[in-house]
């Protein structure tokens, strides 16, 4: 049986949770998802629980978010890494990343450059505060705990029977 997104190629330059979850769903629906990791590997490879002894290739967290994906390592700070990424962009349908705002531009892959490489590319960027956030916020790192704190959720949640986290 043909899956809904068969024939769609997605470049996944994401890490940690939000964007990898989005690309996981695309892979589950049949898209060919190519997860591009930096030379040290995705940070999520360090998160437990581990399948067997702790090891970068045994992170249950990483495995669950990257199921059905292909994976490769590119050093985007080097010319060869950029050359390979440029070639992948040219033959891909979608690019998903969750770097801090302007990081892609600094690497030479801002929206204008992506359009030159592949005019039909769909570009999805995920950031905690958005690219046009209040001054000083757009470039801040954003993880689950920060989202709970900024949203006020920490003031109403905590250990059962204990005080809320603040």
Image (spheres, rainbow, N blue to C red):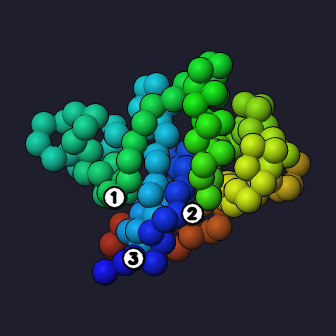
Question: From the viewer's perspective, is the residue at label 1 or at label 2 nearer?
Answer: 1
Give the CA distance from mark 1 to mark 2.
Answer: 30 Å
User: 125 or 55, which lies in front?
Assistant: 125
Label whose residue precedes the other's in the sequence (3 or 2):
3
Marks 1, 3: nearer the viewer: 3
Find numbered disc 2 in the image and state the secondary structure of the residue it sits on: helix
Marks 1 and 3, how far apart at CA: 13 Å
Q: Label 1: few (<14), some or many (≥20) within 10 Å? A: many
Residue beneath the point at 79% across and 37% down? 105
Q: Would you call the spot at circle 2 few (<14 residues within 10 Å), some (14-19), or many (20 or more)?
A: some
Q: Residue furthest bottom?
A: 1
Q: Which secondary structure, mark 3?
A: loop
Q: Quadrant of the N terminus?
A: bottom left
- Measured as percent of width and height from the top left, residue 127 is found at 67, 54
Q: Can you say whether 150 is above or below 101 in the image?
A: below
Mark 2, residue position: 148
Residue occupying image coordinates x 28% and y 34%: 56
Viewer-closest of 154 and 6:
6
Which SS class for mark 1?
loop
The residue carrying mark 1 is: 68
The x, y position of residue 146, in whole percent, is 59, 54
Q: Position of residue 145 (x, y in %)?
A: 53, 55
Going by the image, does 10 lie left or right of 63?
Answer: right
Any part of residue 104 in sight = yes
The residue pinned by badge 3 equals 3
For the C terminus, the image quarter is bottom right
């Amino acid at each position: 049986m043909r899956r809904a997104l068969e024939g769609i190629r997605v470049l996944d330059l994401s890490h940690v949770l939000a964007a990898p979850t989005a690309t996981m769903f695309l892979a589950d629906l049949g898209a060919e998802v190519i997860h591009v990791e930096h030379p040290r590997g995705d940070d999520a490879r360090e998160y437990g629980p581990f399948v067997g002894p702790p090891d970068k290739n045994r992170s249950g967290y990483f495995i669950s978010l990257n199921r059905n994906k292909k994976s490769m390592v590119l050093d985007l700070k080097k010319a060869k890494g950029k050359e390979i990424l440029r070639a992948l962009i040219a033959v891909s349908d979608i690019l998903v990343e969750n770097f801090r705002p302007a990081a892609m531009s600094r690497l030479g892959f801002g929206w204008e450059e992506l359009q030159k490489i592949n005019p039909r590319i769909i570009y999805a960027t995920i950031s905690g505060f958005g690219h046009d956030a209040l001054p000083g916020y757009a470039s801040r790192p954003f993880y689950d705990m920060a989202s709970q704190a900024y949203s006020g959720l920490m003031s109403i949640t905590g250990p059962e029977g204990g005080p809320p986290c603040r």
